[in-house]
Image (spheres, grey):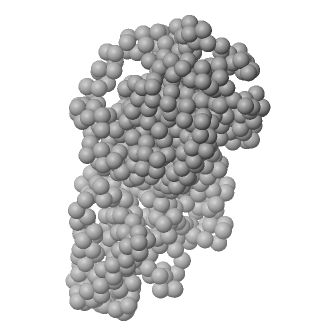
């Protein structure tokens, strides 16, 4: 209901959205271009499908994401990476990176993210079918998140921060925000305070990963530009004021007017935050009768230049490299301040106003280390800048403290990539889409895959059927060219419904279908090193308003299921203990086996236990199942199956008191795991 209400409000606001774009386009014509992308009328290139989507709303988020983008391209070279945004300035910066990476043969794409209308998002996501949606910071849209949930697309919010003020806004509209936050697969925050606020607002899966901006990616072009400009500034004291806003430029210019009288060698590099303000700031400088040059017309400073107006895009990092000290804009007014980390990364002394709530934690850390100077008035600016000019060693020391703090806080990229690997376990799985058939397959097991592999008749004609199992339904054992065997299983309906409808299921996204869900769960468990069969291929076949499904799983050689084994001999206490420990391993990974019975437990010739038949099973996260009672229920399900076989079979080597050995192994494995966690945190 909340999503419907939100969508109706958004639809009613459409004229205002269009008016906003048209007004912005008066200063930046790019805002009235590429409307077809914003309304999902033009879809991305087909080469962007089935990969990873990274949404960075604007230039700041895109710049912060660069180290992550670099790592994603290295880690997943076989997957297309699509970077989306909503602003033309970000689009231009992304397009430049895309061109550079394509020259290197990288699969990098770019487009605008459509407006958050439900139909548009559904159309766009259904076409893209990404394996993961990554969102930078808190650019959260309810229909985007809801449709990802409906299409089984995992969502990962990274570098998330939530100030106390923003949390109040979320709480005020909790009717909308709470369901949205609960639908997000994982939120990785910059700090503990943000994590606590997200959890208080109803988010289920929240962890602290650190701040991406502590791992600044400085391009070669930025370094080269700074190097080329540095000779022009010899003998000058360089004061860079970055990302300034209206109301601040006036104060900074007032301070400079006083400082230049005493320090004529002082050069102010003024870099406004928004491009549409470039001309207004130039006019302000002219009114103040200051000698300035504009970067946009390739203006270069000489000894008489007092102010260098940085009215260009994407060059702020170069200015910071050239600075002796840096003022962080948006902080003398109630804007909340901008990112000081870029200046810290270059070891520059940082000055900032009192309004820094957007980066409160960073400034708290800087304050603890005495690594920045707070200024509130023009008088503060004048006295602080004068001190830094007169005592250059103070500027160097302050910058060094900031750099040390910056280096101590690194590591966010590694933690984010670890979570990406969890959410994108099947990066190597290939897909085959033909008509109404969608197949997933392991290219290492089937290098020359065909859809015919799901038909028992195909294998019969080849003379490769090694046998079959006729329980409730037929399962085929297929000999493979790699000297292995696979199990071909068709999915059937059970119960009363199965008598009327043998093998057709209600339509749902392919990733949630019976075959694909079991395939992906098996794949994930194999990555964790759990003893389960290898998934080889899965088929999702549409039939009008229904679907059917098939799966091919590698057959584990030389095994016997526990039900048949206990008809031949009893298990030793050690074997029961090992089986209990094995079940505990699955439960430690939150794996729920919906039918844990003695027929689905195998023992091989090497004495290794295996679990099989993971249809309708799942990973049950602690946040979704906080009481964890399902684990005890799993064990009771196995106990019931053993007692049932004991009652029905004339010979069955099982006594109920033997279950104590299994429980002992289960408990010991749990204690060992707890001790390992304690040791890793000490």
Residue 365 visible from this viewpoint: no
Residue sitting nearer the eye, 56 or 657:
56
Seen as rendered, the residue at the extreme front is: 262
At horizontal 23% and vertical 66% (from top left) the residue drawn is: 629
Residue sitting nearer the eye, 350 or 605:
350
Q: Viewed as shown, does residue 138 lie left or right of 622?
A: right
Q: Position of residue 163 (x, y in %)?
A: 34, 38
Q: Viewed as shown, does residue 614 lie left or right of 229?
A: left
Q: Position of residue 337 (x, y in %)?
A: 44, 32
Where's the C terminus, which quadrant? bottom left
At horizontal 48% and vertical 9% (from top left) the residue drawn is: 22
Q: Viewed as shown, does residue 431 lie left or right of 209?
A: right
Q: Position of residue 55 (x, y in %)?
A: 50, 35
Residue 361, by quadrant, is top left
Residue sitting nearer the eye, 317 or 344:
344
Above or below, 432 relative to 446: above
At horizontal 44% and vertical 32% (from top left) the residue drawn is: 375
Residue sitting nearer the eye, 521 or 79:
79
Above or below, 604 relative to 5: below
At horizontal 35% and vertical 69% (from top left) the residue drawn is: 587
Residue 633, by quadrant, is bottom left
Q: Position of residue 143 (x, y in %)?
A: 37, 31
Where's the N terminus, which quadrant? top left
């Amino acid at each position: 209901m909340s999503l419907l209400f939100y969508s109706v409000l958004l639809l009613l606001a459409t004229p205002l959205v269009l008016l906003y774009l048209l007004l912005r386009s008066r200063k930046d014509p790019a805002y009235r271009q590429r409307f077809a992308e914003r309304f999902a009328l033009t879809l991305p290139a087909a080469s962007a499908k089935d990969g990873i989507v990274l949404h960075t709303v604007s230039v700041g988020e895109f710049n912060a994401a660069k180290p992550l983008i670099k790592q994603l391209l290295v880690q997943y070279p076989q997957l297309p990476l699509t970077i989306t945004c909503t602003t033309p300035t970000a689009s231009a910066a992304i397009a430049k990176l895309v061109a550079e990476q394509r020259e290197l043969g990288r699969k990098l794409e770019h487009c605008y993210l459509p407006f958050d209308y439900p139909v548009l998002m559904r159309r766009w996501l259904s076409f893209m079918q990404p394996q993961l949606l990554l969102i930078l910071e808190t650019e959260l849209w309810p229909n985007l998140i809801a449709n990802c949930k409906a299409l089984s697309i995992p969502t990962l919010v990274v570098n998330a921060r939530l100030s106390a003020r923003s949390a109040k806004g979320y709480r005020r509209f909790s009717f909308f925000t709470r369901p949205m936050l609960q639908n997000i697969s994982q939120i990785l925050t910059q700090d503990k305070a943000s994590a606590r606020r997200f959890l208080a607002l109803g988010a289920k899966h929240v962890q602290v990963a650190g701040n991406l901006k502590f791992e600044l990616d400085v391009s070669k072009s930025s370094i080269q530009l700074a190097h080329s400009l540095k000779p022009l500034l010899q003998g000058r004291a360089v004061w860079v004021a970055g990302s300034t806003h209206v109301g601040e430029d006036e104060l900074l210019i007032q301070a400079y007017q006083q400082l230049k009288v005493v320090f004529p060698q002082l050069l102010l590099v003024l870099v406004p935050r928004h491009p549409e303000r470039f001309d207004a700031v130039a006019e302000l400088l002219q009114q103040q009768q200051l000698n300035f040059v504009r970067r946009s017309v390739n203006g270069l400073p000489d000894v008489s230049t007092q102010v260098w107006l940085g009215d260009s895009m994407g060059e702020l990092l170069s200015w910071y490299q050239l600075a002796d000290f840096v003022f962080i804009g948006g902080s003398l007014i109630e804007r909340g301040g901008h990112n000081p980390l870029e200046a810290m990364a270059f070891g520059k002394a940082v000055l900032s106003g009192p309004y820094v709530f957007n980066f409160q934690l960073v400034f708290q850390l800087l304050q603890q280390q005495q690594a920045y100077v707070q200024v509130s008035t023009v008088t503060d600016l004048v006295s602080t800048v004068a001190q830094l000019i007169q005592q250059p060693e103070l500027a160097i020391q302050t910058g060094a403290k900031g750099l040390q703090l910056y280096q101590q806080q690194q590591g966010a990229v590694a933690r984010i990539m670890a979570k990406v690997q969890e959410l994108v376990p099947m990066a190597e799985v290939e897909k085959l889409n033909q008509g109404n058939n969608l197949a997933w397959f392991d290219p290492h097991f089937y290098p020359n895959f065909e859809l015919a592999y799901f038909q028992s008749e195909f294998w019969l004609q080849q003379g490769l059927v090694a046998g079959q199992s006729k329980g409730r339904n037929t399962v085929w054992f297929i000999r493979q060219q790699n000297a292995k065997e696979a199990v071909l299983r068709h999915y059937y309906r059970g119960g009363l419904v199965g008598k009327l409808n043998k093998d057709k299921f209600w339509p749902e996204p392919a990733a949630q279908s019976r075959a694909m869900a079991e395939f992906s769960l098996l794949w994930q468990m194999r990555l964790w090193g759990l003893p389960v069969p290898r998934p080889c291929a899965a088929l999702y076949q549409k039939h009008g308003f229904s679907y059917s499904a098939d799966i091919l799983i590698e057959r584990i050689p030389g095994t016997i299921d526990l039900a048949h084994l206990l008809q031949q001999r009893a298990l030793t206490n050690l074997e029961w203990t090992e089986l209990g420990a094995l079940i505990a391993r699955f439960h430690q990974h939150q794996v729920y086996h919906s039918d844990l019975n003695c027929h689905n437990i195998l023992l091989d010739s090497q004495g290794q236990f295996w679990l099989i038949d993971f249809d309708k099973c799942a990973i049950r996260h602690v946040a979704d199942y906080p009481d964890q009672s399902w684990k005890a229920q799993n064990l009771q399900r196995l106990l019931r199956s053993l007692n049932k076989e004991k009652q029905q079979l004339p010979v069955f080597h099982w006594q109920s008191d033997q279950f104590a050995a299994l429980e002992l192994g289960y408990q010991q494995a749990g204690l060992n795991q707890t001790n390992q966690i304690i040791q890793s945190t000490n």
